Each structure stands twice: as C-alpha cells, then as structure tokens.
Amino acid sequence: MLLKQSAISLAADIKAKKISSRAVVEAHIAQIKCVNPRLNALIYDRFAQALREAEQADAVLAQTTDTSTLPLLFGVPCTIKDTFEFEGMPQAVGMVSRKDIYGQHDAYAVAALRKAGAIPLGVTNTPELAMWYETYNRVYGRTKNAYDRGRITGGSSGGEGAIVGSGASPFGLGSDVAGSIRMPAFFNGVFGHKASPLLIENQGHFPSAHGQTLNYLSSGPLCRQAEDLEPLV
C-alpha cells in the first residue's frame, strides 16, 4: 500500500515503472485532504505544483533507459517544517509578526531534498518561534496527535510528526535543538533522527543559530519506515 511504504521503496517502484510518481503524489494528497482538517498539521500546500513536478518526473522516466542515473528520492513526495525557507511558501514559524513572510529561496536542506528528486507537498506547523513542547501558535492554531486528537503532537517539529504519523507523507524535514525531532516522532509513532551538529548546513533555517547554539541545532528526517533514516541523512 502506497501510504505504508518507505520513501526508498516508493522511489524504487517508480524507477521500476511499477507505479507513476503522479499516482504516489495523488495518493498522499488525498490522505492529507482526509486527515488534515482534523489534525491541522499541514498549514500551506503546494498540491498543484507537486502534481506538475510529478508529471515532469514521469516524463523524464519515460525517456530514461538507465534508471540508476536518477536521484535517490526520484518522484517521492515529502513535507517540510515551516522553520525552513522554501521558495513561495510561508515561513511564519508561528509568529504573528512573520505571518506575511514567504520564502525567496530554498534553505540548504530543502534544496538538497529537491535535488535528490523529492517533491514537497507543503509546509507543516510549529510552535511559536519553534520554542515549545506543544505545537500551537496564534497564526495557525494547534496541531493534534496523529493517533489521539485529545493529546499533543509534541514540538517543535509537531506538524511533521502528525502528518507522517497519519500516513500522509512518507517523510518530512524537521529540525532539533533539544528534542524537536525526537519527541514528535515518539509521540506520533514514527522514526526521527537528529543529525550530528553541522552535518547538514543550517542555512535558511529560522530561528538561526549562533555561537554555542550551533552545536545543538540540527536538521533531520521524520519518516514512517526506519529504513529511510540513514539515506535521508
């Protein structure tokens, strides 16, 4: 079932022409539309763009004889935490003063995922300034746990934890200082990994890190299957 496969498995099936990128993207968009009204995890979508990118991937695949040349995550959908600058997407990070700020470029980690062939479906909710244990803010409201809407989803990558935990995204890009990937992953029954400091460039992340904080702020994946952890880092 598409909503249970790992990102690596989905990419392999797309490259083997067992299924189209568009079909995979459509399945996850349908799941987002089903669960997100209850979870409030995805705060801004780019479904139309994602479908166009999936069609472009399928067109490239149709003309490719050696699929080993295709990137690792070719044609696979994903989601992005609101703390990362993403061209055309909001980067409010739960702050009223930033509610009209949209990305002009892609953050380093976002660009790396897109270069690897991933197709982002949209951006996910965070607590205000990505500072709290619970994902709630006065711009987008509260994100609820994927398994029990009466419980919290954790923070600050809580939107990612909920959307991946609900089967609506194979994996998402999160960030972590003191548990911001690990807690939402645990609370929502998925896998998460905080990369070693400075292994992944923090450029384009807000809040930014300076001085000793650089030893703590790290990007990393939240994913529904453990086999995705190593390749996504």
Image (spheres, helix red, strand yellow):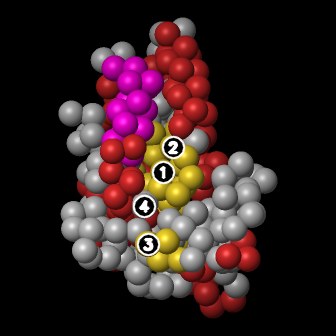
Which circle marks residue 127 in the picture? none
Which circle marks residue 121 in the picture? 2
Q: Which residue corresponds to the image point at 39% horizontal and 45% vertical from the top-left? A: 32
Q: Main secondary structure of the magenta part?
A: helix
Q: Quadrant of residue 187?
A: bottom left
Q: Earlier in the sequence, mark 1 or mark 3?
A: 1
Distance in Å between CA atoms under marks 4 and 2: 15 Å
Camera-nearest residue between 145 and 59: 145
Camera-nearest residue between 219 and 27: 27
Q: Let me know if residue 94 appears in the view.
A: yes
Q: Earlier in the sequence, mark 4 or mark 3?
A: 4
Decide: few, some or many residues near mark 1? Use Cα within 10 Å; few <14, some 14-19, many ≥20.
many
| Side (left or right) of 198 relative to 183 | right
Q: Earlier in the sequence, mark 3 or mark 2?
A: 2
Distance in Å between CA atoms under marks 3 and 2: 20 Å
Q: Which residues are magenta?
A: 19-32
Residue type indicated by callout 1: Thr
Q: Position of residue 22 (x, y in %)?
A: 45, 24
Foreground tag (1 vs 4): 4
Q: Which residue corresponds to the image point at 41% horizontal and 81% vertical from the top-left? A: 134
Question: CB under 8 Å between callouts 4 and 2?
Answer: no
Distance in Å between CA atoms under marks 1 and 4: 14 Å
Question: CB under 8 Å between callouts 1 and 2?
Answer: yes
Residue type indicated by callout 2: Leu
Screen quadrant of the C terminus:
bottom left
- Mark 4 = which residue? 40
